[in-house]
Amino acid sequence: MKQNTKFKYSEAVSYSDDAQGLKCHTVDIWQSELPVGQEACSEYWIIFIHGGAWRDPEITSSFAEAAVAVLQDSTQKHNIRGFASINYRLSSHPNHPASPSHPEDPSRNAVHPDHLCDVQNGIDYLQKRFQFGSRYILVGHSCGATLAFQTINNQKQSSGMPIKETVPPQAIVSAAGLYDLVLLRDSDSEPPSCQGFLSHAFGSDEEVWRSQSPVYGNYDATWSEGRVAVLLQCSEDEYVSPMQLTVMEKALQGWSRKEGRLLVCLTVSGRHDDCWKMGYGLAYGVETALDHLVAKPSHG
Ligand SMILES: Nc1ccccc1C(=O)C[C@H](N)C(=O)O
């Protein structure tokens, strides 16, 4: 019965085989309880990646809860096979007022590409378990948006830790994204904070910041599965300037020219974190992506 779509919730499912069993190597899952039917080819997994400047211990996988609640009740719910929200190791934040990081804590001392490795491991776990291939939408907020685009650009990265090669998503919904890291630092307000967390997350070599910035991706070459990119900006964002969206829109323009692809930029109301705290902003982005994916199904 369409009206009875229910999603079974599993909290903190481990995606890693490490013996430590770290909480940061887990994913929350909401799985549709409907039997896989004829509509399976129009059903998507929605996979969330949280923000928090790679370091904020108060922003975790649970950031997706409000958007999941909105989407479970939306007209698009029949096109959703499940939701997942990925935790990943954070970078150090020794000055956090309530929970400063400890130098020995393996979950709070990550440096690029650790965050990305974890996200790719989470997606790999979900892809193996649920077999959805490219039929998923990656939804990233703030640095989670950076990570979402990095999963496409870093498929074959060979230096450092091995990164799982996951099948890229058919759509990305990115909200308040950090797309050009050097520009982010250069447009920092007073008192500056970006230099600090960017150095903790990527080290001091700005060439790494540049090469890891989503604006320098070659999406025409690397994202052949991609059919929709929805870029959201928050009208009262206190951290991210509208320039970030402008440069990313430009970076995706060549990719978007191919027939059947959609690049949309949307403005949602509220401050940097309101779009996930209230859920409506992220849900609106996901609904926009699903509208296009389902109206023009690909049979590839
Ligand atoms: N300064 C930023 C610039 C861009 C994006 C996020 C932030 C943050 O500070 C977010 C987070 N609430 C934090 O304090 O870590």
Image (cartoon, rainbow, N blue to C red):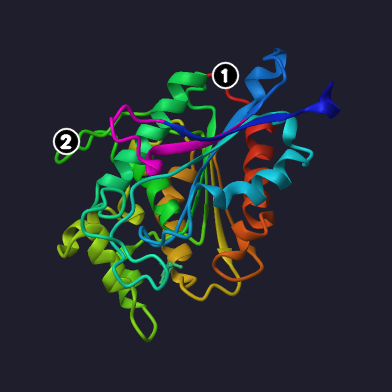
Against 16, residue 272 (above or below) is below
- Compared with residue 216, is residue 170 higher up or lower down, i.e. above or below? above
**Left or right: where 293 falls relative to 251:** right
Residue to which mark 2 is pinned: 158
Ligand 1 positioned in quadrant: bottom left
- State which quadrant residue 293 falls in: top right
Q: Residues within 10 Å of mark 1 (few under 14, many from 20)?
A: few
What is the magenta range?
A: 15-30
What quarter of the picture does the N terminus occupy?
Answer: top right
| Residue located at (42% from left, 69% from top) | 98
Q: Is residue 115 left or right of residue 258?
A: left
Q: Nearer the viewer, residue 52 or 183?
A: 52
Kind of residue sitting beneath label 1: His
Q: Local crowd at mark 2 within 10 Å, few (<14), some, or many (≥20)?
A: few
Residue 299 bears which disc, if any?
1
| Dot 2 or dot 1, earlier in sequence | 2
Is residue 24 rendered magenta in the image? Answer: yes
What residue lies at 82% left-to-right and 27% top-to-bottom?
A: 4
Residue nearest the viewer, comparing 119 with 19: 19
Q: Judging from the image, what secondary structure is the residue with disc 1 in? A: loop
132 up-or-down from 229: above or below: above
Query: Where residue 181 sits in the image (x, y, percent)?
Result: 31, 64
Q: Alpha carbon of mark 2 to alpha carbon of mark 1: how far?
A: 32 Å
Question: Comparing marks 2 and 1, which lies closer to the viewer?
Answer: 2
Residue at 17% across / 60% down in the picture? 207
Q: Can residue 130 be seen from the camera position used here?
A: yes
Residue 72 rendering spot, x and y as whole percentages: 73, 39
The answer to whether 289 appears left or right of 4 in the picture is left
